[in-house]
Amino acid sequence: MKIKALVAGNWKMNGLKASAKEVKALARLIAKSPKKARCDVLICPPATLVSTLKEAAKGSKIAIGGQDCHANASGAHTGDISAEMLKDAGATYVIVGHSERRADHGETSEMVNAKTQAVHRAGLIAIVCVGETEAQRDAGETLTVIREQLAGSLPKGITAKNTIVAYEPVWAIGTGRTPTADDVAKVHAAIRAVLKKRFKSEGEAMRLLYGGSVKASNAVELMGVPNVNGALVGGASLKAADFDGIIAAYR
Ligand code: 13P
């Protein structure tokens, strides 16, 4: 099955209005490349920049997304932002269940499940993150942890159009360390098997992203792994040239 890849940037808590110049620069790099990238491109900035970057990305293929949302559409939840609000600001995707939210905000898979449903309620695409910690990996629990997170975080009835799964080993995030291609292949094959069993043909067609220290120098190898349909990129998505170097894996 041919699945169109997605190269997604997660800016985390980085970026000011001036960062719109990176999006404009990326749009220029993509447009002037002699070979067309055979992938979709997404940037998920802090919520404060969604509408600014949407404007900066106008006329390009770059989509804009959120990094988290509340499970409700509106209400008395000071400081929170709903999927509907992100959509209103110009987002078409929302990342949910990132390990930094699971760790910093105590988000459980049950909460991630509710947020994923909220993303769908708003008509947006959810990027649901899963990944094991280093201790879990050392204890040989990687696949058990991933299967539990998938079972808990993914609501019933999801489709390949409205949901993407991102595998991000916690120990590989921001560390410069990555699993071997073989290790990524094993985990992604296990994720695919879970998705196929539960969601049938939708699970077969769903995009699976790898995230954790992806950069231009390892993108070709990591993106070439079976069942890897793109990347979720942190640090290397902040600068247009670095991010374009990863998109180049699909040229
Ligand atoms: P890095 O690419 O900086 O390792 O971050 C990965 C990540 O957490 C993307 O969501």
Image (spheres, helix red, strand yellow):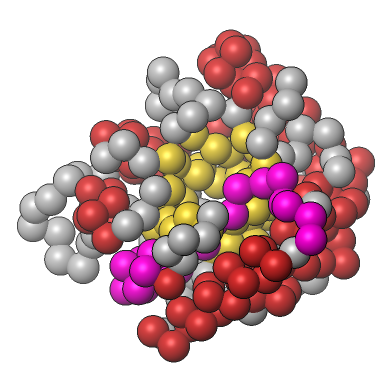
Name the residue located 53 percent from the left edge and 26 percent from the top edge.
160
Residue 75 is a magenta residue: no
Task: Pinpoint residue 199: horizontal percent, then vertical percent.
Answer: 54, 16
Q: Is residue 52 above or below residue 125?
A: below
* Residue 79 relative to residue 12: left or right: left
Residue 238 point in image, percent of width and height? 60, 76
- Taking the spot 71% from the left edge, 76% from the top edge, the residue there is 241
192 or 236, which is in the foreground? 236
Instruction: Find the residue positioned furthest to the left.
Output: 76
Which of the 4 image quadrants contains residue 115? top left
- The N terminus sits in image quarter: top right
Which region of the structure is painted magenta?
Answer: 34-55
Q: Residue at x 87, y 54 (%)?
A: 220
Tell me what residue is drawn at x 27 percent, y 60 percent.
Answer: 89
The answer to whether one can see residue 44 in this image is no
Report the residue that reaches farthest toward the bottom.
Answer: 18
Q: Is residue 43 part of the magenta span, yes or no?
A: yes
Q: Nearer the viewer, residue 58 or 230?
A: 58
